[in-house]
Amino acid sequence: MTSYLLWMSGVTYWYTRWRRVLRFSSGVITEPYLPVKRHAELVREARWHLAGYGLIAGISVAAHSWAAVIVWLGPMLAMKGVHQLQNTIEHLGLPHEDNVLANTRSTRTNRGMRWLGWQMQYHTAHHAFPGVPFHRLHELHDAIFTSRGAAPPSMTYVGFQIAVLRAFARGKTEVDYPDNRTWIADPPHG
């Protein structure tokens, strides 16, 4: 339960994201699902992120301004739990492989939640074609999956949270599960 609460608070999210940005910016990329041909781009992007964050911090300190905290960091921290609700369902418990149909989950939810989430609940379609604007993701999902009678991995928010709580029972964490197979999925129907 502790690992679940830490995950939902965003503490582990920020820790792993900052470690990854620092690691990437130093040229170290170990994720097997990130193609080698994209490594230089990822290193460059991480360095730009660090430069941007440094610039924002520097300007804020020099100007004695809390604007970055009030307009950016404060709202981001206040909504982190909601972000984690969406963020965790997208990839947690799926294999770490270079196959968007296996490593990305879409969310089964209602129209209101899809509107609030800018259609990111069609996450598999988004990862398959990230250049498609958010307002067209439903059409893309239909073209890729629904019209062909297929479906990507998907779960409801509640079903996913129940599965995560079961997976993290008795002190287990994400590192206790293999990277090469699915360990959070809907139970088989039937």
Image: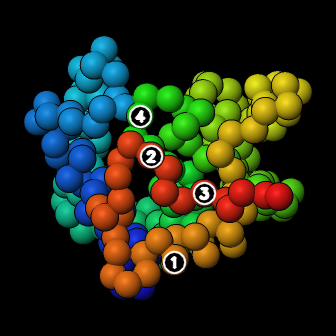
Residue 157: x percent and y percent?
68, 66
Gap in Å between the C-alphas at discs 3 and 1?
A: 12 Å
Q: Mark 2 points at which residue?
A: 181
Q: Which of 121 and 151 is in front in this view?
A: 151
- Of the residues tagged 2 and 4, which is closer to the observer? 2
Q: Which of marks 2 and 4 is nearer the N terminus?
A: 4
Q: In this view, does 121 lie above or below 133?
A: below
Tags 4 and 3 touching, CB below 8 Å: no
Q: Which residue shows up at 27% across the image and 57% down it?
A: 16
Q: Earlier in the sequence, mark 1 or mark 2?
A: 1
Within 10 angstroms of label 3, few (less than 14), some, or many (20 or more) residues? some
Tags 2 and 4 touching, CB below 8 Å: no
Residue 80: x percent and y percent?
49, 70
Q: Earlier in the sequence, mark 3 or mark 1?
A: 1
User: SS at mark 1?
Assistant: helix
Tags 1 and 2 touching, CB below 8 Å: no
Amino acid carrying mark 4 in the image? Glu
Gap in Å between the C-alphas at discs 1 and 2?
A: 18 Å
Amino acid carrying mark 2 in the image? Arg
The disc at residue 185 is: 3
Q: Name the residue under label 1.
A: 165
Tags 3 and 1 touching, CB below 8 Å: no
Amino acid carrying mark 3 in the image? Ala
Tell me if residue 139 can be seen: no
Within 10 angstroms of label 1, few (less than 14), some, or many (20 or more) residues? some
